[in-house]
Image: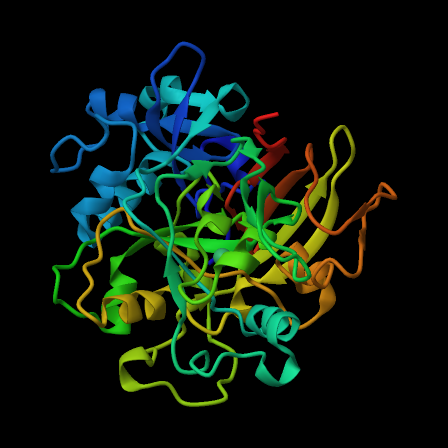
Amino acid sequence: MPLMQSWVASANAATTPFPLNNLPYGVVSTNGQDPRCAVAIGACVLDLTAVEEAGLLALDTPTLFAHPSWNSVMAEGPALWSALRTRLTTLLAAGSPAQEQLAPHLIPMSDLHLHMPFEVREFTDFYASKHHATNVGTMFRGAENALPANWLHMPIGYNGRASTVVVSGTDITRPCGQLKAPEADAPHFGPSARLDFELELGAIIGGSTQMGETLTVQEADDLIFGYVLLNDWSARDIQAWEYQPLGPFQGKAFATTISPWIVTKAALDPFRSKAPPRDLPLLPYLQEPGPMLYDITLAATLAPENAAATTISQTTSSQLSYSAAQQIAHHASSGCAMRSGDLIGSGTISGPKRHMRGSLLELSWGGTKPLMLDTGQARHFLEDGDTLTLHGSAHGDGYQIGFGSCSGTIRPARTAS
Ligand code: MN
């Protein structure tokens, strides 16, 4: 599909992350104004709360945008998602007769504050990159035991915290926790010295299931409303001491950052891609009916305080071995209920080469090999004042589908002294 033309001129540039083909959903405010739902188009957003109030949405639905979150739309299901996207495409297309009525409801992006686009109900994070799992396993358990015995058979995950999922631009305070060096006799409590990021995609569940209900992979895919970039901030020293036998806890509970725009499944549909070849066949309930991944170009940049950013990782989501649909099908396979507003993290997305590693743990190989930045500074893990930003875009014929950035700056730990 080529670039679709819009009457919003900035949406027709090959370099905009937000052409008419994209139409990602967010929550925005300008100074002194209440947050409201909006759709990004070129260098502007269209204020959908105002468009709905003006009667221009013309959808046969209850009020969708009375509250500053996308949860109401998400809960309506795929028929409404499709009708809304079709209507917005018509309104914003070149030659739209509604242009004059809509123009007053366009807001330049530069004037905006971006808020959480939806209320997160629950957050589950997976471990779907074979390269990441192999790298981490090699460091923690040796090359022979790198992949856990279950890894090739199912998507492994842990239940995270929805309470501390924040939108891009929110500062991240360095967490404190129990730390124990391998040679120490006893743990102490203090600031993490091995603070890390994880480059991930987040899938947002729109529909719901009942307790006891299971899902095929296709049914699970049908529940997905859209995707965001996701940084699963990780305190490796807290994690290393606490993680056996029940998995990550405080080492990942202090913050998760998402990008501000929900990129819909419909916008990403032209970029579906197949999973890499499998070592072993999956059990029937996990087998995918078609390509379930996406070819999204991903990157991470690190900027020390008052210094330029260095690109430290470049990878693609087509490297994942399990799709969000397979993860959700697995999650529901016990009868666990899925709810509208649930957030599913892909797991760190690393590729086969060094520059494709999606965490500092891997890039500095457990803190043993410093990563050199373009500024000449070295990093093993994140330092106070560092800004870590994730970037993502899918590349089509003369256009791109962008996510907006997913950024956070590290602030010093809160200490008692
Ligand atoms: Mn993670």
Q: Residue furthest front?
A: 185
Q: Is residue 132 above or below residue 189?
A: below
Q: Residue furthest top?
A: 32
In this orientation, which residue lies closer to the viewer: 276 or 24?
276
In this orientation, which residue lies closer to the viewer: 5 or 145?
145
Q: Position of residue 71 (x, y in %)?
A: 25, 39
Q: Is residue 204 above or below residue 320?
A: above
Judge whether residue 15 can be spotted in this image. Answer: no
Q: Position of residue 92 (x, y in %)?
A: 38, 35
Residue in view at x 84 percent, y 43 percent: 377
How many numbered badges does the structure rendering display? 0
Query: In the rendered view of the protein, which quadrant contains the C terminus?
Result: top right
Q: Which residue lies furthest to the bottom in this view?
A: 280
Q: Position of residue 134 (x, y in %)?
A: 59, 75
In this orientation, which residue lies closer to the viewer: 84 or 218?
218
Using residue 334 as the reference point, say whether residue 412 is left or right of it.
right
Judge whether residue 208 can be spotted in this image. Answer: yes
In this orientation, which residue lies closer to the viewer: 377 or 195?
195
